[in-house]
Image (cartoon, rainbow, N blue to C red):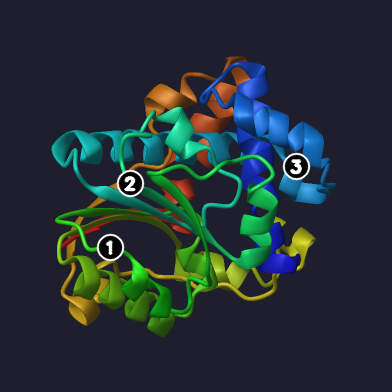
Amino acid sequence: MNGVNKTLYIPLYGKASVSKKGIILQDKKAEMIWEKEGFKLKGKAKSKWLTYYMGMRSVVFDVWVKKMLQNYPSACVLHIGCGMDSRIERIGAKQNVWYDIDFPVVIEERKKYYTETQNYHMISEDASKTEWIASLPETDHAIIIMEGVSMYLKLQELVALLNALKEHFGNVHIFMDCYTEFAAKASKYKNPIKTVGVQMVYGLDEPKYLEEQTGIRFVKEHDMTPIVLINELKGFERCFFRHVLGGNLSKKMYRLYEYEA
């Protein structure tokens, strides 16, 4: 795997770590895969604070997807940049048509732990390309998950991807996390993803930029570190995360946006 592909091990470790501790997120599949894969992370990629971020981010995404599926029960789901994530199992969405999409080498690894069904499909594709979207069946609504993806796409690639999704499905509901421009610049000097060889990432400060470029409406910004999840921590860790790492500091680096068309 190259650097971008190896980044999947960072959220996998984060989810496995908090799940093993019995806080924030329950993900036995992540625990099992992490134990079997045995990939060696080092430095800040194994920071306990980062594991809390990864766990909280996953929960916020899970909650949003559940809500969308309640509102649009016949929608298909596209999880772009799925890595080894077990979201379809965590939220119990096996009755929906669901596509997990990632690079071929990632999907090859993923198939060791997941099995395709009539509704569940794994697609080996590069998110920076859009040709594969045309081969998907059209549905009335598509729920698009982009967790830990946008920062690896140039803005023109992100715009092209969103435009292609909107043109194919018509009604799309998109949830994505983004680096800020400050975070992208700071990543040149200090970022856990550098430990797996990633050197270049991209940021977005103005969420309405994508609305202007694609016509996909910006709905709202979401909180990536909600207090109910911070309260899963104990003692000093809860206090430190709440007052230092959560809230405004988190937003200085990371933003979480919802769009629809």
**Coordinates of residue 228 in the picture (x, y in percent):** 39, 23
Q: Amino acid at mark 2?
A: Val
Disc nearest the viewer among 2 and 3: 2
Q: Amino acid at mark 3?
A: Lys
Numbered circle sitting on residue 137: 1
**Coordinates of residue 173 in the picture (x, y in percent):** 23, 55
Q: Nearer the viewer, residue 71 or 137?
A: 137
Q: Quadrant of residue 218?
A: bottom left
**Coordinates of residue 254 in the picture (x, y in percent):** 46, 55
Q: Residue at x 41, y 74 (%)?
A: 132
Q: Residues within 10 Å of mark 2 (few under 14, many from 20)?
A: some
Q: CA distance from mark 2 to mark 3?
A: 34 Å
Q: Residue at x 70, y 52 (%)?
A: 109
Furthest-front residue in this view = 118
In the depicted structure, whether residue 163 falls above or below residue 16: below
Q: Nearer the viewer, residue 166 or 153?
A: 166
* Residue position marked by numbered label 2 in the rendering: 97
Task: Identify the mark nearer the N-term, 1 or 3.
Answer: 3
Q: Is residue 54 visible?
A: yes
Q: CA distance from mark 1 to mark 3?
A: 40 Å
Q: Is residue 224 left or right of residue 169?
A: right
**Coordinates of residue 9 in the picture (x, y in percent):** 69, 49
Numbered circle sitting on residue 37: none
Q: Quadrant of residue 103?
A: bottom right
Q: Residue at x 51, y 67 (%)?
A: 151
* Residue position marked by numbered label 3 in the rendering: 46
Q: Is residue 63 left or right of residue 16?
A: left
Task: Identify the mark nearer the N-term, 2 or 1.
Answer: 2
Q: Quadrant of residue 258?
A: bottom left
Per the image, label 3 sits on a secondary structure element best described as: helix
